[in-house]
Amino acid sequence: MKIEVLKENLKNGLNIIEKITNGKNLSLPILDNVLINTEENFLNLSSTDLETAIRVWILVKIFKKGKVAVPAKFLSSFISLLPNEKITLEEKKQGLYIECKNFKNQIQGVNPEEFPIIPEFKDLEFLLFESSKFWQGLSKVVDVASPSQSRPEISGVYFVFYKNSIKIVATDSFRLAEKNITIDTQVKKEFSFILPQKPAIELMNILEGRNGKVKIYFSPNQTIFELPMEEVDHPQIQLISRLIEGEYPNYEEIIPNKFKTHVVLKRDEFINQIKAASLFSGKVNEVKIRIDATSKEAEISAQDPDIGESISVISAKIEGESIEASFNHKFLIDGLLNIKSSEVIFDFSKEDGPCVLKPVGDASYIYVVMPIKAA
């Protein structure tokens, strides 16, 4: 193999694929490598952890076809230090020779035939979405999922495809986030799947700041997210992931539809007061919120015998009864940061029941958080 590639294009590709390699895979060290392969007029970079695979294609000048496998993170770190020039890559005896202005280097590789086979998919149905809208929806829920060996289904992000919309959901059993996205393409048949959290995060990182479209291909136990190239009819990036087997919990049952107290607060002021109280919450992360329906105020407090006590008050629009509940401040802040409206709705179902945070004027996002039960 011998090719010529722009440094910036190679660097960007390596930055994407290296994320799923950790450089410390003692049982299968081949997984720490990137497979570099020529395909038609493209250089293909591939990495995998056996659960997820990422493939990136770059337009290059090919002098000789071939392939090589070298340590992904080492190569990425080295390429980032080179000048913004054309780079020549050449495979010799399983080593990768790199040459550009003022640099001549050789990185020892491994046998590329040992690299795991990444499955090819043909003739699969796919849907096409705006990548920016898809990223926005995914970013609001992906951090809520939590690894669970006893309940693997909540370890991922739940996607439900309806005729003209997608619902994206994640929960860790203490909180839940749901985002609805309207789509232009009509879905022929409603379906759903659970994507593990790690590839969901990688997908979010890939899509961030990108315009254009993203394709989603479906198979019974895997899914493919693909970003097409703009200049030619060819994939630019593919993320292939296994799906989590099993049924997602019937989470809609825990979302209350009746509320004892309805509160509207200024978002930024509410966040700041929770953050201030959190400094006094100690190791338990507990802040107490007391809603006074008479004075139309919300009191946010926290105390720790080794630190001290904090009490603050914020004016609010309140309907219903006075109520108080304690929460993990981290969970509250996570939900509030995903709300961009200037005001936020905070609905209480009962003293120890689930509470709902949502933006004012936007019904597409809800965040359900459970209070900390009194000992």
Image (cartoon, rainbow, N blue to C red):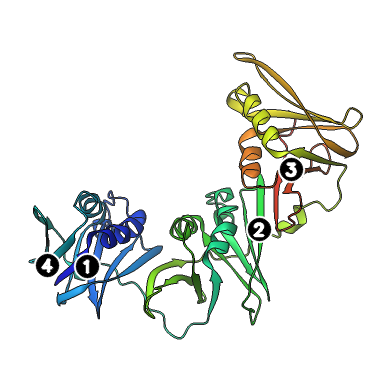
SS state under label 4: strand
In the rendered structure, which amino acid carries the disc numbered 1? Glu
- Marks 2 and 1, how far apart in space? 41 Å
Residue 221 in view, yes or no: no
SS state under label 1: helix
SS state under label 2: strand
Q: Are marks 2 and 1 in contact (CB under 8 Å)?
A: no
In the rendered structure, which amino acid carries the disc numbered 4? Glu
Counting residues from the N terminus, which is met first, the one under dot 4 or under dot 2? 4
Where residue 22 appears, as percent x and y from the top left, is 32, 50
The residue wearing badge 4 is 91
SS state under label 3: strand
Residue at the image position 66 percent from the left and 38 percent from the top: 332
Counting residues from the N terminus, which is met first, the one under dot 1 or under dot 4? 4
Q: Determine crowd level at label 3: few under 14, some 14-19, many 20+ residues with C-alpha closer than 10 A.
A: some
- Marks 1 and 4, how far apart in space? 16 Å
Where residue 304 appears, as percent x and y from the top left, is 64, 18
- Marks 4 and 2, how far apart in space? 47 Å
Quadrant showing the N terminus: bottom left
Q: Nearer the viewer, mark 3 or mark 1?
A: 3
Q: Height in image: 45 above or below 353? A: below
Counting residues from the N terminus, which is met first, the one under dot 3 or under dot 4? 4
Q: Determine crowd level at label 1: few under 14, some 14-19, many 20+ residues with C-alpha closer than 10 A.
A: few
Quadrant showing the C terminus: top right
In the rendered structure, which amino acid carries the disc numbered 2? Lys
Q: Determine crowd level at label 4: few under 14, some 14-19, many 20+ residues with C-alpha closer than 10 A.
A: many
The residue wearing badge 2 is 179
The residue wearing badge 1 is 114
